[in-house]
Image: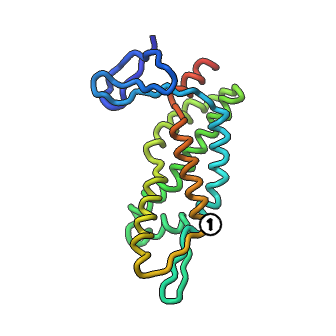
Amino acid sequence: MKTIICRHCDMVSNIPHLPINYVAKCCRCGGALYKNTKCRPSVLLALSLTALLVMIPAFYFPLISVNLLGITEDTNLLQGALMMLDSTPVVSVVVFFCAVIAPTLLISCIAFSSLCLTYNYFPASIPKVLQLTHSLMHWSMLEVYMVSLMVAVFKLMSYSDLYFGSGFYFFITLLLLDMTIISNYSNHAYWERYINGK
């Protein structure tokens, strides 16, 4: 019988045989141990590659245009993340990491591990990539950036004209792809696929 350690309370538990899409919970703290999802690396590979392609226009194309007193200013996601670099560098770096670096690294890691598992190629770097993927899950926060962007839009609407740029729609697409990838990805299933196929 295989065992798993609860990441909430460090209790060691036996892994039960679960039906697909059921979640095993810790008997001590009730935290989720893992979800038994169907491992489909080829599907996640396609979604990840699509997300990586969508990232380019989502990060570089204008998100919104602000027209105030006859002056129009465009901003994209990268500019928005680095806008506070002079006044509050720590906040700016955290926003840049959580909105740009972490999602890019996370999707790249999932794409790499999915590619390897799809074609039954098991390089020595896969364990480190799977560990990094698990860590980045907690730092990728595209949805938080989206919420803060919408709050800023509602506040600016009262005294300026706002226009959504093409980058906004690419960002929405990227957010939906990111949520789909994360909800269908199982680090535990990838580890099992790697161990069994090695």
Is residue 34 rendered to the left or right of residue 127?
A: left
Residue 89, x across and y down, in percent: 41, 65
| Quadrant showing the N terminus | top left
Residue 143, x across and y down, in percent: 46, 53
Res 26 visible:
yes
Residue at point 46%, 81% (across, down): 160
Residue at point 56%, 67% (across, down): 63
Q: Quadrant of residue 153?
A: bottom left
Furthest residue in direction left, as rendered: 28
Colour convention: rainbow
Query: Between residues 183 and 111, which one lies in front from this camera angle?
Result: 183
Res 75 visible:
no
Query: Callout 1: 10 Å neighbours few (<14), some, many (20+)?
Result: some
Is residue 154 rendered to the left or right of residue 128?
A: left
Q: Amino acid at mark 1?
A: Ser
Q: Which residue is mark 1?
A: 166
Residue at point 45%, 25% (across, down): 22
Residue at point 43%, 17% (across, down): 15
Furthest residue in direction bottom, as rendered: 70
